[in-house]
């Protein structure tokens, strides 16, 4: 997922980098440092998404927050951030109220709901703006990374324009501001509700059309699985696992197949990693590894061809995968053999003093195996979005 800065201060940039670390496939550990390849595949299939995103409605709500923020007059640019957070709190309160009224409880995925429920003074550290702005940019809803500066400038210009035209024609002020292009840094949905008074996670017809049109027309989404699913909401089975997705067009099926092959390969390495971490005592993992290793050899998978599908800034992760595959194919898999050395060295290089294998500070637990699952490339988030788009629209 590409994440752009929306503020130029060092403090805000630091926060964005922290969020970038959180937007990976899972908060689970990446002991072998394959996250960049994983995220590259995820961006190739599902651009603009992250595992921090929980509801697609925010792609309609956040532009409304920014439009509302432009109504205030600011003395300093730094005041814009505070106003956005204030509006986000109001939005969160209304989402929570609606959720309780409809379901009897606060639905999961409402950013900041815990703060509202516990009546804490501070809002969440990572607010909806940080979580959803990358998607807003990818879908070409938000058209600039300089969000605060543009809201500040638009607000000032808007109030000056209103003052200028007030004496001549009060009704012309809003039209004049529109014509001067002050709103062009962001697209705004035309909805029949005011989020500061009432809003829901359920999509209205206008919300749905706004989001779908932008995803379908965004350059970054062309030729992706995300665009295909949004354009064909009825062609994906509910609750289907990522690796079991069927019926894709040939080009998308090819990308999906490569992503599945990489997920299978990395899963094999982590099975072996956990077996080494257990000090070669978890016999269940040894049996699983031997079966998967033989299956991989028989599959004819070529990891070099798989990795050629994605670009990453640091090619060390690709080099590690190719070396590990070579040892796997050559059957260098005895205890303490070349594959094990490759895995151990990779973890030490990535985690340094926090490496687990051979470190007395960490004890293996068969109930808490490391990365003992297959990559799904944010499919859970995308599946949630698709489900929400498929629901009957809500009358705002």
Image (cartoon, helix red, strand yellow):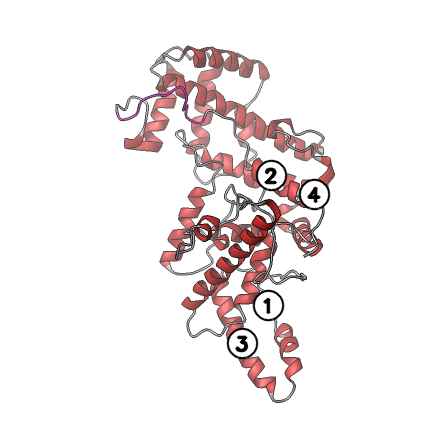
**Quarter occupied by the C terminus:** bottom right
Classify 383 as above or below 173.
above
| CA distance separating discs 3 and 1 | 11 Å
User: What crowding class fits label 2: few (fewer than 14 Cα within 10 Å), some (14-19), or many (20 or more)?
Assistant: many
Where in the figure is residue 256, as x and y percent of width and height? 62, 31
81 displayed left or right of 158: left
User: What crowding class fits label 1: few (fewer than 14 Cα within 10 Å), some (14-19), or many (20 or more)?
Assistant: some
The front one of 85 and 182 is: 85
Q: Are marks 4 and 1 in contact (CB under 8 Å)?
A: no
Where in the figure is residue 169, as x and y percent of width and height? 65, 86
Classify 289 as above or below 262.
above
Quickly name the residue at label 4: 390
State the extent of the magenta-drawn residues as a range: 361-371
| CA distance separating discs 2 and 3 | 40 Å
| CA distance separating discs 4 and 3 | 40 Å
Which of the two discs, 3 and 1, labels the residue nearer the N terminus?
3
Check residue 183 in the rendering and tell me which mark sits there, or answer none.
1
Label 3 secondary element? helix
Quickly name the residue at label 2: 45
The front one of 44 and 320 is: 44
């Amino acid at each position: 997922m590409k994440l752009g800065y929306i503020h130029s201060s060092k403090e805000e940039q630091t926060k964005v980098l922290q969020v970038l670390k959180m937007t990976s496939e899972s908060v689970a550990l990446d002991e072998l440092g394959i996250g960049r390849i994983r995220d590259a595949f995820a961006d190739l299939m599902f651009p603009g998404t992250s595992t921090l995103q929980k509801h697609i409605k925010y792609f309609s709500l956040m532009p409304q927050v920014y439009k509302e923020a432009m109504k205030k007059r600011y003395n300093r640019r730094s005041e814009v951030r505070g106003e956005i957070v204030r509006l986000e709190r109001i939005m969160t309160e209304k989402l929570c109220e609606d959720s309780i009224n409809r379901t009897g409880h606060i639905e999961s995925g409402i950013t900041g709901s815990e703060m509202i429920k516990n009546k804490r003074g501070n809002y969440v550290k990572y607010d909806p703006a940080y979580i959803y702005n990358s998607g807003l940019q990818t879908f070409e809803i938000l058209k600039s990374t300089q969000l605060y500066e543009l809201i500040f400038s638009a607000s000032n210009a808007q109030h000056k324009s209103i003052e200028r035209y007030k004496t001549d024609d009060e009704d012309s002020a809003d039209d004049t501001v529109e014509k001067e292009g002050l709103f062009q840094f962001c697209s705004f949905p035309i909805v029949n509700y005011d989020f500061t008074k009432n809003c829901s996670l359920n999509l209205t017809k206008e919300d749905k059309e706004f989001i779908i049109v932008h995803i379908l027309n965004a350059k970054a989404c062309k030729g992706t699985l995300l665009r295909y699913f949004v354009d064909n909401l009825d062609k994906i089975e509910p609750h289907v696992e990522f690796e079991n997705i069927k019926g894709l067009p040939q080009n998308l099926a090819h990308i999906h197949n490569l992503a599945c092959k990489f997920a299978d390969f990395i899963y094999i390495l982590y099975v072996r990693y956990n077996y080494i971490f257990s000090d070669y005592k978890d016999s269940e993992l040894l049996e699983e590894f031997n079966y998967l290793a033989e299956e991989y050899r028989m599959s004819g998978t070529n990891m070099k061809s798989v990795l050629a599908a994605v670009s990453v800034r640091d090619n060390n992760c690709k080099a590690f995968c190719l070396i590990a595959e070579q040892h796997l194919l050559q059957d260098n898999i005895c205890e303490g053999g070349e594959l094990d050395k490759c895995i151990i060295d990779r973890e030490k290089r990535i985690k340094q003093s926090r490496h687990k294998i051979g470190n007395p500070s960490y004890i293996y637990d068969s109930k808490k195996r490391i990365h003992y699952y297959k990559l799904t490339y944010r499919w859970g988030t995308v599946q949630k979005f698709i489900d929400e788009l498929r629901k009957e629209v809500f009358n705002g």
